[in-house]
Image (spheres, helix red, strand yellow):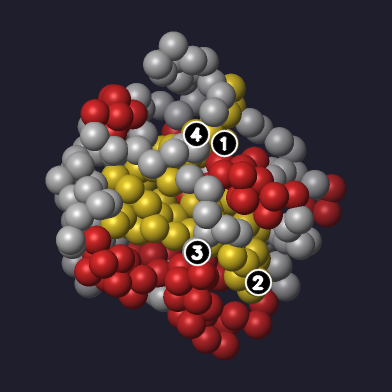
Amino acid sequence: MIRLVVCAALGIEARAVRRGLGLEGAAVQVLRTGYGPRRAARAAAALPPFDALAVVGFGGALDARLRPGEVLVATEVRYGDLVIPCPSARRLAAELARAGLPARLGPLLTSDHLVHGAQRAREAAGGALAVDMETGPLAAAAGGRPLAAVRVIVDAPGAPLLSPGTPRRAAAARRTLRRLGPPLTRWSAAAGSSIPAVPPAAEPSSAVIPSAAGSCAATGPPAADPGAPEPARTGEARRTVRVPPPKEMRS
């Protein structure tokens, strides 16, 4: 049985995921890591044994075309000078679509502070679609095992975090988090069983995966080749983390 660990920063996020798992939760550990990158790093150092790792929760949109309530599945996680790939992102997006949750695919940035105002535009210009404060340290601990990062958007350029509409948007995002459990368990079973993942080059950075109930047009800028070197952003070069899987995961 695949050991899936799901990490969420806040209690409200972790409880929502647990409730959505139902009976499927017997094989899944849902952990509350705490808010911010320092707490996430401490949690990463104390993770229980796992075969697949998912980091989920609320997030902020950087790209103005990503709206509150939408779901982002990260194709890569950017954290400091690291770029941590998520090779099975398209597979997870397909599982979410089966559950009626269309998802955007693209880079996720982990910041050590809240991003708002003009900084949103600067980070969006670098290609990141959304931002959080916890995924980076946890993703770095995946060690080559299947990794998923999912963020439900609560704030966006036109809907700032410190605004009257935030409680309503957070409540809607919590309901979406409750629906993530079954798709995550199906994703982990497939990704952890050594079924070949979709090659990174086939994962467009701004694709929309249609839900089973209907179709969604792809939006956002043209997909970049994930295999090509990423240009330096704000004067900083990034290095891609490609860690070989542990021995027990190799065929």
Q: Name the side, left or right, on which 154 lies relative to 106.
A: left
Q: Residues within 10 Å of mark 1 (few under 14, many from 20)?
A: many
The amino acid type of the residue labelled 3 equals Leu
Q: Nearer the viewer, mark 3 or mark 1?
A: 3
**Relative depth, front residue between 128 and 104:** 128
In the rendered image, which residue does mark 4 sit on? 78
Per the image, the residue denoted by label 2 is 29
Residue at x-position 52% and y-position 15%: 237
Q: CB of mark 2 within 8 Å of CB of mark 4?
A: no
Is residue 159 visible in the rendered structure shown here? yes
Q: Are marks 4 and 3 in contact (CB under 8 Å)?
A: no
The local secondary structure at tag 3 comes to loop
> Could you tell me how far apart the alpha carbons at marks 2 and 1 are, in whole angstroms?
22 Å
Is residue 196 among the parts visible in the rendering? no
Q: Is residue 67 left or right of residue 149?
A: left
Disc 1: which residue: 84
Q: Position of residue 100 (x, y in %)?
A: 30, 71
> Closer to the camera, 180 or 214?
180
